[in-house]
Amino acid sequence: MKKNKILLPLLLLWTLCQQAVFGQTGQPAPPPPENVFLVRGFAIGGPKVKEVDRFVKFINEELATRKVNTLILRIDFNYEFESYPQLRDSIALSKSDVKKIVDACAKNKIRIIPQINLLGHQSWAGTLHNLLRVYPEFDETPGVIMPEKYVWPNADGLYCKSYCPLHPDVHKVVFALVDEICDAFHADAFHAGMDEVFYLGNEKCPRCSGIDKAELFAGEVRTIRDHLALKNRELWIWGDRLIDGKATGIGLWEASYNYTYRAVDLIPKDVVICDWHYERPDQTAVYFAMKGLRVVTCAWNRPQVALSQVENYYRARAVSGKELRPRFYGMAETIWSSPSQFLDGYYGKVANPKDGDNTPWNTFKVMFDRMGQLEQAAPATK
């Protein structure tokens, strides 16, 4: 009897272990699916104050159900900054507005990465943005006057203005904003933008003239990265300035014609690259991974391009060795309309027949569905 009292618990334990390993059928249980997409991202502008509740609803009901785990939120000047209140938008998110978003993301285990465009994108079309409007001395090209009616191409080569990365006072201002917005969103990472920088190292700039543009770009990346590292925060940027636009044929927008691409070998390897291509699925994620950088492949408004990007990412990661594989960091859907326009489209409140299926909301659905399918089918890796 005493012997049985010992044997029966051991037999029960053995049975439970067998079921855990082999399942109820006696066959080996399949390994859990691999977490192929470490980043399942969604990038969009911060909502207007009146749209916050609808945006929170979208987080809870749509981002969470698709297992989105990273929200890149472009804030720029859409926040009631206390450090430099003169840089706020006229109507901006309050701390209580931000808390609603933070709480929704925390509940759904979504990491928030706030974004303020640094270096480039200090203007758009004929509009000068807040930083250079309030601090015109930071302008890399003060001689280029904002036009009343913007056209491209133009004699000045004006796409977007840049601030001068070597101005002695610029970082005091922008880093105060960066710190404040990261604190507000409880963020351990920050997205600095840095895409489509056409004005850099201008020949008339008293500080930048004659300096290698790759060195200037890499220097600004390092400066921002080092500042964030003081509070153990991570830097994310767009990847287009690190690609040779002429050699690859990718062109002026999604890659660089002004020689900043050499900076890819000069920036710290812990910077995360958001690699965006929207009209064709150029496989530059492989390039960034082989340069030692983690890369997130980004889609926008063409479902078929996004599907190709998902497949390319999956294959590249699958055939890579253990050193390279973790650098294929994930995928993100990017939204370039306002949040209200996106939500109206997503929920069917507006329709644009000429676009057909080529909409960001359709791309979002198709892309995440395919990511989920591949992740379920992925074998476990060592």
Image: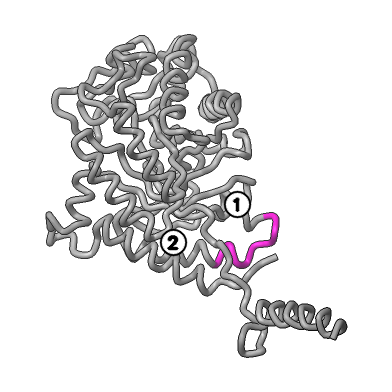
186 or 173: nearer the viewer = 186
Q: Which residue corresponds to the image point at 64% horizontal and 62% vertical from the top-left?
A: 320
Q: Residue furthest front?
A: 1
Q: Is residue 156 above or below residue 58?
A: above
124 or 21: nearer the viewer = 21
Q: Amino acid at mark 2?
A: Gln
- Tag 2's secondary structure? helix
Give the extent of the magenta segment: 315-323
57 or 127: nearer the viewer = 57
Q: Which residue corresponds to the image point at 36% horizontal and 9% vertical from the top-left?
A: 137
Q: Residue furthest bottom?
A: 25
Q: Using residue 220 as the reference point, say whether residue 280 is left or right of it.
A: left
Q: Choose top left, top right, bottom left or bottom right for residue 84.
A: top left
Q: Using residue 31 as the reference point, say whether residue 158 is left or right of it.
A: left
Mark with earlier residue (1, 2): 2
* Residue 137 showing in the rendered view: yes
How crowded pointer 1 is (Cα within 10 Å; few <14, some 14-19, many 20+) is rated as: many
Quarter holding the N terminus is: bottom right
Across and down, in percent, residue 151 comes to 19, 33
| Residue labelled with disc 2 | 309
